[in-house]
Image (spheres, grey):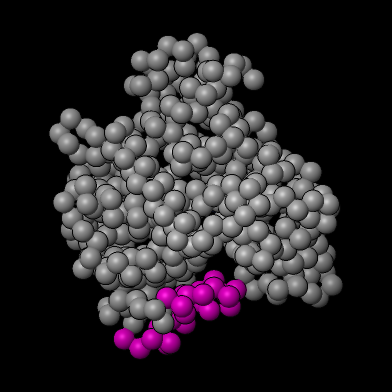
C-alpha cells in the first residue's frame, strides 16, 4: 500500500469529504508499515475495501413542528463494515451532520468496536435535525418520522444503532417505541435504552467512566496518578458529565466545561451538585453553558473561547471532532500538560496530535479512550440476548476489564523503541489487524 496514492484516489472519488478523508489518512498512515509486512493484505486489497462503506442509506425525514409547519430533514445510516459482527454505532442529531461526518464516525467505529474485544462491526447514522430549542413533542415526532424509514435497514443481528451527540435516553425511547410498533418485535434493536425496556445499568455513564479508567491506566503506566491533578473538560453533555463524575470521584479537580457559546472556568473545581447541574443544563435544550456562571458564583464564563488556554495537568476533549487544534495544543504544551485523552471522536486535529507526539505528551485517541460507551452497548446486547440483567457492579467490572484490555493492547502495539507509548499507532494497528485478518479469512465479499 502507498498511502499518498490511495488518498489521492479517495480525494478524487469523494471530493470535499474532509472529516472522512482525515480519519482515513490517520489510520492508513499508522498501519502502512505493518500492512506492507503482511502480503495477504495487499493480495486481498484490504485497504481499498476497508475505506469504503458497505452501503449508505440516505432518506428524507418530513415532520410537522408545533406551529403546524412542515419541516424536512435528511436521515442517514452508514453501514461501514460488518466483518467481525453486526453493524454497530450511534445516531447523531446535529445541524452540522452530513455524509462526510457520518462516514468518518462510521470508519472510526470499525476499529473502536474491534478494540472492545466484543463482536461488533462499524456503523453510524443520524440527521441534520437540530434539537436546540425543540419541544419534547417535536423531538418525539421527529424521532418517529426518522424511524419510519430507518427500521427497514436495522435489526438485532444486522445493525444496532445507539446514541451520539443530540441522541440520549429520551430520543432512544421514542425511536425504540416506533421500531417496536413497526417491526412487531421486542428484541432490543437499539442500545442506550431505558431501564424499564431492556437498557443496561451504567450505559449512561459508560463513555465517561471508561475514559477515566483508560486515563488512570495511561497515568499509572507512566508513573503518575489521577488524584490531585487538575483537569480541563470541554462540552457539557453526556460524555463530559460521565468523565467529570468519575474524575472527581477519583480525586481529580475538574476546572472547566464548555459549550458552543464559550467556556466556564471554575477554580474551586466541580462537585456533586455542579455535576448534577449539567443534567439540568442539558435538559433545557438551549445548548449553552453560560448560565453556569450565574448559578455558581466564583466561576467565570469566557464567551467565544475554548478551555484549552487554561493551565492544567490533563485535558479531556469531550465535545466534538476537531475541537482542539494546533494552536490549542501549543498552549497546552507551554502550560505543561502531561496527558491529553480524547473522549470525543477525533477531538484533536492532525496538527494538534503531531505537537503532542513531538513533545512526548501522553496522547490517547478517541477510538481507544471513548470505547467504553460502545463496549457497554455490547454488554447491553448480550443481556438482551440472554434476556436477563446484570447488576451495576457486574457491568462496571466488565467495563473496567475491557478498558484495561484496550490499554494493554495499545501498549503492546504502540510502544516505541525509546519507551514512549504512541497510543494512536497502537490503537489503529490493533483495531485494523483484527478486522483485516477477519476480512482475509472470509474472502472477497
Ligand atoms: N456514539 C457512541 C460512540 O461514538 C456509542 C455508540 C454505540 O453505543 O453504539 O462510540
Q: Position of residue 390 (x, y in %)?
A: 54, 57
Q: Is residue 185 visible?
A: yes
- Depth check, front residue: 7 or 422: 422
| In this picture, residue 97 sits left or right of residue 187 | left
**Is residue 141 shown left or right of residue 103?**
right
Q: Is residue 418 above or below residue 285?
A: above
Rendered view: 324 above or below 77 = below
Quarter of the picture containing the N terminus is top left
Residue 125 x/y as whole percent? 64, 47
Q: Residue at x 75, y 73 (%)?
A: 137
How far across and down, in percent of the image, does residue 199 sit? 61, 59
In the rendered image, residue 443 lying in the magenta stretch gets the answer no
- At a point 47% along the width and 16% down the height, the residue shown is 41
Residue at (28% x, 38% y) in the render: 411
Residue 308: give x, y in percent of width and height.
Answer: 31, 62
What is the quadrant of the C terminus in the image? top right
Please give the range of residues in magenta: 275-298
346 versus 282 height, above or below? above
In this rendering, the count of numbered labels is 0
The residue drawn where x is 63% and y is 37% is: 86
Answer left or right for 245 relative to 96: left
Q: Is residue 343 visible?
A: no
Examine the structure image and report whether residue 276 is included in the region drawn in magenta: yes
Amino acid at each position: 500500500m502507498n498511502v499518498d496514492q490511495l488518498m489521492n484516489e479517495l480525494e478524487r472519488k469523494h471530493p470535499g469529504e474532509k472529516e472522512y478523508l482525515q480519519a482515513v489518512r490517520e489510520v492508513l498512515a499508522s498501519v502502512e508499515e505493518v500492512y506492507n509486512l503482511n502480503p495477504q493484505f495487499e493480495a486481498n486489497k484490504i485497504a481499498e475495501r476497508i475505506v469504503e462503506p458497505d452501503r449508505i442509506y440516505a432518506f428524507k425525514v418530513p415532520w410537522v413542528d408545533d406551529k403546524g409547519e412542515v419541516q424536512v430533514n435528511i436521515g442517514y445510516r452508514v453501514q461501514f463494515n460488518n466483518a467481525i459482527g453486526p453493524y454497530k454505532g450511534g445516531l447523531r442529531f446535529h445541524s452540522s451532520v452530513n455524509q462526510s461526518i457520518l462516514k468518518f464516525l462510521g470508519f472510526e467505529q470499525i476499529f473502536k468496536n474491534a478494540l472492545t474485544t466484543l463482536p461488533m462491526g462499524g456503523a453510524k447514522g443520524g440527521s441534520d435535525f437540530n434539537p436546540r430549542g425543540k419541544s419534547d413533542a417535536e423531538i418525539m415526532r421527529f424521532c418517529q418520522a426518522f424511524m419510519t424509514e430507518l427500521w427497514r435497514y436495522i435489526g438485532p443481528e444486522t445493525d444496532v444503532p445507539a446514541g451520539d451527540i443530540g441522541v440520549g435516553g429520551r430520543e432512544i425511547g421514542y425511536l425504540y417505541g416506533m421500531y417496536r410498533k413497526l417491526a412487531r418485535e421486542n428484541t432490543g434493536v437499539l442500545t442506550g435504552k431505558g431501564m424499564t425496556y431492556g437498557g443496561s445499568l451504567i450505559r449512561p455513564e459508560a463513555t465517561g467512566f471508561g475514559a477515566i479508567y483508560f486515563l488512570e491506566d495511561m497515568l499509572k503506566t507512566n508513573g503518575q496518578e489521577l488524584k490531585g491533578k487538575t483537569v480541563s473538560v470541554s462540552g457539557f453533555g453526556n460524555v463530559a458529565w460521565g468523565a467529570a463524575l468519575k474524575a472527581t470521584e477519583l480525586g481529580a479537580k475538574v476546572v472547566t466545561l464548555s459549550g458552543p457559546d464559550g467556556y466556564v472556568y471554575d477554580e474551586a473545581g466541580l462537585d456533586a451538585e455542579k455535576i448534577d447541574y449539567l443534567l439540568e443544563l442539558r435538559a433545557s435544550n438551549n445548548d449553552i453553558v453560560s448560565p453556569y456562571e450565574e448559578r455558581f458564583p466564583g466561576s467565570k464564563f469566557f464567551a467565544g473561547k475554548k478551555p484549552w488556554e487554561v493551565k492544567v495537568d490533563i485535558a479531556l476533549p469531550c465535545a466534538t471532532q476537531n475541537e482542539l487544534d494546533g494552536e490549542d495544543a501549543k498552549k497546552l504544551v507551554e502550560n505543561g500538560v502531561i496527558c491529553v485523552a480524547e473522549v470525543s471522536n477525533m477531538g484533536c486535529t492532525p496538527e494538534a496530535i503531531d505537537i503532542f507526539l513531538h513533545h512526548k505528551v501522553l496522547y490517547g485517541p478517541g477510538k481507544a479512550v471513548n470505547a467504553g460507551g460502545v463496549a457497554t452497548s455490547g454488554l447491553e446486547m448480550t443481556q438482551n440476548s440472554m434476556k436477563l440483567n446484570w447488576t451495576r457492579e457486574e457491568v462496571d467490572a466488565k467495563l473496567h476489564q475491557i478498558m484495561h484490555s484496550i490499554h494493554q493492547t495499545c501498549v503492546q502495539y504502540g510502544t516505541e523503541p525509546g519507551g514512549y507509548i504512541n497510543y494512536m499507532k497502537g490503537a489503529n494497528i490493533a483495531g485494523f489487524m483484527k478486522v483485516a485478518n477477519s476480512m482475509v479469512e472470509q474472502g472477497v465479499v
